Image: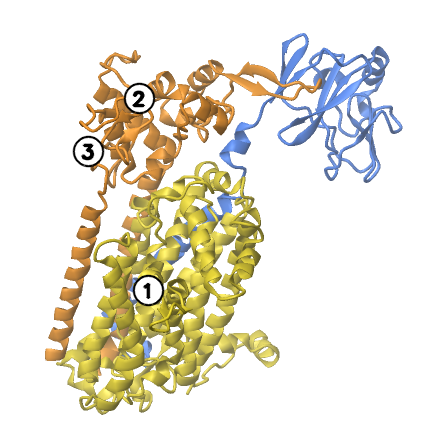
Amino acid sequence: MATDSKDSSTGNGIKRRDFIYVASAGLGIIATGSAVWPLIDQMNPSADVLAMSITDVDLSSIAVGQSITVVWQSKPVFIRHRTPEEIAEARAVPLEDLPDPQTDEDRVQRAEWLIMVGICTHLGCVPLGEQGLYGGWFCPCHGSHYDTSGRIRQGPAPDNLVIPNYEFLDDNHIRIG
Amino acid sequence: MSNRMMSSKITKTIIGVIFGMTIAAGVMAAGNQRHAKDMDWSFEGVFGQYDRAALQRGLKVYQDVCASCHSLKYIAFRNLVDIGFSADEALAIAANYQVTDGPDQFGDMFIRDGRLSDYFPLPFANEKAARFANNGALPPDLSLLAKARANGADYIYSVLTGYEDPPADWDPNSLMSYNPYFSGGAIAMMAPLFDGFVDYADGTEASVEQMAADVTTFLYWAAEPKLEARHKMGFKVLGFMLVLTIVLYFANRKTWTEVNKK
Amino acid sequence: MSTDTYNPKGKFFRWMDDRLPIIRLMHGTFVSYPTPKNLNYWWNFGSLAGIVLMIMMITGIVLAMHYNSSADAAFDSVEHIMRDVNYGWLIRYVHANGGSMFFIAVYIHMFRGLYYGSYKAPREMLWILGVVIFLLMMMTAFMGYVLPWGQMSFWGATVITNLFSAIPLVGDAIVSWLWGGFAVSDPTLNRFYSLHYLLPFVIIGVVILHIWALHIQGSNNPLGIDVKGPQDQVNFHPYYIMKDSFGLAAFIFVFAVFVFYFPNMLGHPDNYIPANPLVTPEHIVPEWYFLPFYAILRAITFDIGIPGTDIVLLDAKLLGVIAMFASILVLFALPWLDSSPVRSARFRPIYKWAFWIFFLDCIMLGYVGSQKPEGIMPILGLVGTVYYLAHFLILLPWLSRFEKPLPLPESISNPVIKATGEVGHEQ
């Protein structure tokens, strides 16, 4: 009944047979592979989600020493109207004391407005404001302390709180994204 | 062998009967509605793609004529990039619209200029408002109309260009217009297009037929925005599958040669 | 029947084989399974149906990641898939047309079984499990069609669930239980979604039983005669793996023509109108694969009562429902209704005609189901329904007794050696 291909094929026959089988298998693998990509890519952010990238904020009602949290791309963004003391404190820290060295000037466009993504760079919790050892933010999940510029000072988080792209439309309005 | 011939005869008869029934079904589908005019569209066929200029003119017709009553709720301004506008041009179009957003930090809704992520605003707040403003009729949303009617493109074009003098038994007090391409013949929408009604940016003469064809193209795109990607991918997939089928045909034949020899 | 030739090579495979012989099972199913060597291309459609089931489940699971089953959001979420989700349009069109492809494969598979007598002893359980799969498929397809929440979804769901109101006494209670409300509404959509997701896994379970039953007795073949020995058989691999692969590629080609160039041809335009509980579409039709059964449902338009009195024993609505369910359930009894010892229609000169007339009857019922019940249609529907049931309940038992079959060939391998007649060309 069943035929054993190795016995019955001769020279030329083997090559032609092998070619057609290798071609079948190769094309079959390409077909399957191409069919898999759409199934993976569908889980990436969809076009409408990607388009929701802008949040406008009116700053006029935020008094000195107050913070608000706005939502940008489904994430909390902290907007803090800093006091002069906080600014001075942030700018007095020597860079070598910082795990992730960055000057306060590099983190703000206007010194009184600190705008940053409110997500701990450790494992993604939302830090609490005006708490912790450095008068900035404190993440309750694993004890990371951030200073008044949102820089990591102590605890497991590796990086400073992230600064999003934003621009001042005028003195009282910013656009994040 | 006779057995085999008989089967093939039976098969042919069956195919004939099925075919005949399909044609009969097509003829009988007509009913109380005139058959749509059979037009040639750039997006038909295996290689069919949208005519960008027609799409942009069609958008203008939608904005200037249809939009006062008909929503286009599934289309966002960002989608206009697909019909040949740059992102800046699309943003400029969006900025012409006022969009309600909010609530702000005081809890109030506010009005702002449209952005790319916004959708075309609705002409009426809700269905009741739409009916109230249109003598009880509800102007349908246009974003899926081309797929929600049989022969959608031909249908839309035919209705837009198909207004005629009503037949003798027409009620003179009727608020409806006569349009034999519309189901039942009585349509609540008055003839919307008149020669020269729209000022085309590209200088095309705005005849009724031209405007109808342009807005039809635009609405077909609105209903099936991925048509171009689909046609392009389809051509590749079919070509590939054809090659794979042929290769597998020979591979299969090869596998079976020795069994068949015995 | 099955010859177990698996011989694990290497330490790991021997270790595994002693503990969980799953590779041995796979080997027995897809490699060493001895198959009649004369199967023709109609035998491809069983494995094709299995592969389409896999395609449907994969695309379905993916669609479920984006679909929203609330009545307010379902329609919008489908449009979101079509417009914004990466490749969403492709995945949805594959799933929507895949339903039709599944039914095409399964109908061909079933008609093949009818023509070649694959339901007869010793394969009755195989056939019965197949009918169970068919029933589960119908339920799954029906509930899936409701999910986009368009006009046809809504009114199809309304009409079909209302079938149960024909049941005496408890009908209305059953219908409102099915709905979870006073009409097809949000709770109905949610439970249909849940069941639409669940049932394919049940189908897989029955498919495994179906394949198990197949491998107990082995495949039938176009001659319908038993396998006499190894000279009549080949191993499933590579022979039928290759043949099925070729068939699969050709089938996918046809599938792709629909997906890429006629994606909405098998659907209905009204389903692109959001569900509106206040307006029924002018002409409700189910998906094409339900049309023959829909015609049977509508075929009976008269009550049956005691003559000379006003007493109605069975009203038209109930009769229609009974006829429709009977037309499916009669398939369970088929192995016993047809008791002719000859399987293949090739050697049954009258049954061959009966088969084709029955096939045409199904096509005609499908056509009647697609038309408005006007003019000649109700009569055609009634005649078709009566013929459908008579085929199984009268014609087949009668044929089994009085038909004189043609002489059967000696064995599968014998006619192949002659190789000049029709049998040699089958492969």
For label 1, the crowd category at 10 Å Cα-Cα, with few meaning under 14, some 14 to 19 and many 20 or more, is many
Does residue C97 sit above or below C275 in this rendering?
Answer: below
**Disc 1 designates what residue?**
C300
Label 2's element?
Answer: loop
Under mark 3, the amino acid is Lys
- Name the quarter where the N terminus of chain B is drawn: bottom left
Q: Chain of mark 1?
A: C
Quadrant location of residue C419? Answer: bottom left
Who's the residue at 33% across and 64% down the image? C302
Front residue (pair B260, C195): C195
Labels 1 and 3 positioned on one and the same chain? no
**Disc 3 designates what residue?**
B37
- Name the quarter where the C terminus of chain B is drawn: bottom left
Question: Residue C398: x percent and y percent?
Answer: 25, 86
For label 3, the crowd category at 10 Å Cα-Cα, with few meaning under 14, some 14 to 19 and many 20 or more, is some
The chain letter of the blue chain reads: A
Question: Residue A103: x percent and y percent?
Answer: 75, 19
The chain letter of the yellow chain reads: C
Q: CA distance from mark 2 to mark 1?
A: 44 Å
Under mark 2, the amino acid is Met
State left or right for residue C322 relative to residue A23.
Answer: right
Camera-near label (3 vs 2) is 2
Label 3's element?
Answer: loop
Question: Residue B63: x percent and y percent?
Answer: 38, 18
**Disc 2 designates what residue?**
B190
For chain B, what colour was chosen? orange
